[in-house]
Image: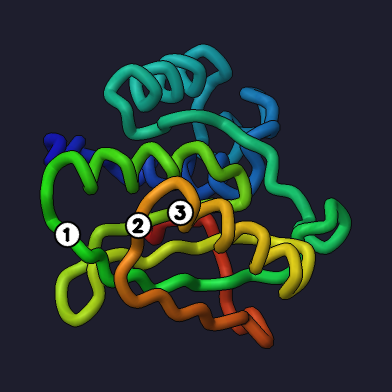
Amino acid sequence: MSEIVELDDIDRRLLRAVQRDAGATVESLAEIAGLSRNACWRRLKRLEETGVILRRVALLDADKVGRGLTVFIAVRCPSHAPDWLESFARAVRRLTEIEAAYRMTGDLDYLIKARVRDVGDYDRLYQRLIREVALGDVSASFVMEAIRETTEIAL
């Protein structure tokens, strides 16, 4: 676990703003934070150097790029051997439809979030995954409606 970086109110204002619009100009961010342009730039630079800001990205409309169906895949692994875990991690990193994969506590071992075109596309993803690594029990749940979905971390 990484060290927590102490943030003040100005840092929080800047971080909320860049989470909403990573392409905002330093001038507009300075205005939001109540800082000069140079002071704002220095703050942003420090937040990047300390690893608070990992990277700046553009968010895409999944429907418009043909990945409108979100699926959560629950996996119970057949083995907890290091070589199986490495093979699973390698396969998950290689399959571009997979947005996130988490090792879990409780009844299931892994939870995968993927974006696909349709159920047939999911089946092709599933077939590729099981060709690369042996899985135990697998179940998929398809998202009917996204009630809340954000990339913002509350500060």
Give the spatial CA distance, label 3 vs label 2: 19 Å
Query: In which image quadrant can residue 117 be found?
Result: bottom right
The answer to which of marks 3 and 2 sits earlier in the sequence is 3
Please state the horizontal and vertical placement of residue 112, each as a whole percent of the image: 43, 62
Colour scheme of this structure image? rainbow
Q: Residue at x 34, y 76 (%)?
A: 137
Please state the horizontal and vertical placement of residue 40, each as a whole percent of the image: 49, 23
Please report contact status of discs 2 and 1: CB closer than 8 Å, yes or no: yes
What number is the disc on residue 91?
none
Please state the horizontal and vertical placement of residue 43, each as a whole percent of the image: 40, 23
Q: Give the residue number, with chain letter if any, for mark 1.
A: 79
**Number of the front mark, 1 or 3:** 1
Residue farthest along the bottom direction in this orientation: 144
Along the line of sight, the residue nearer the viewer: 148 or 64? 64
Give the spatial CA distance, label 1 vs label 3: 21 Å
Along the line of sight, the residue nearer the viewer: 102 or 6? 102
Q: Residue at x 12, y 35 (%)?
A: 3
Which quarter shows the C terminus? Answer: bottom left
Amino acid under disc 1: Ser
The correct choice, above or below, for 136 with respect to 155 in the image is below
Q: Is residue 155 visible?
A: no
Q: Residue at x 69, y 26 (%)?
A: 25
- Mark 2 residue element: loop
Please report contact status of discs 3 and 2: CB closer than 8 Å, yes or no: no
Q: Give the residue number, with chain letter if any, for mark 3.
A: 100
- Mark 1 residue element: loop
Query: In which image quadrant can residue 101 be found?
Result: bottom left
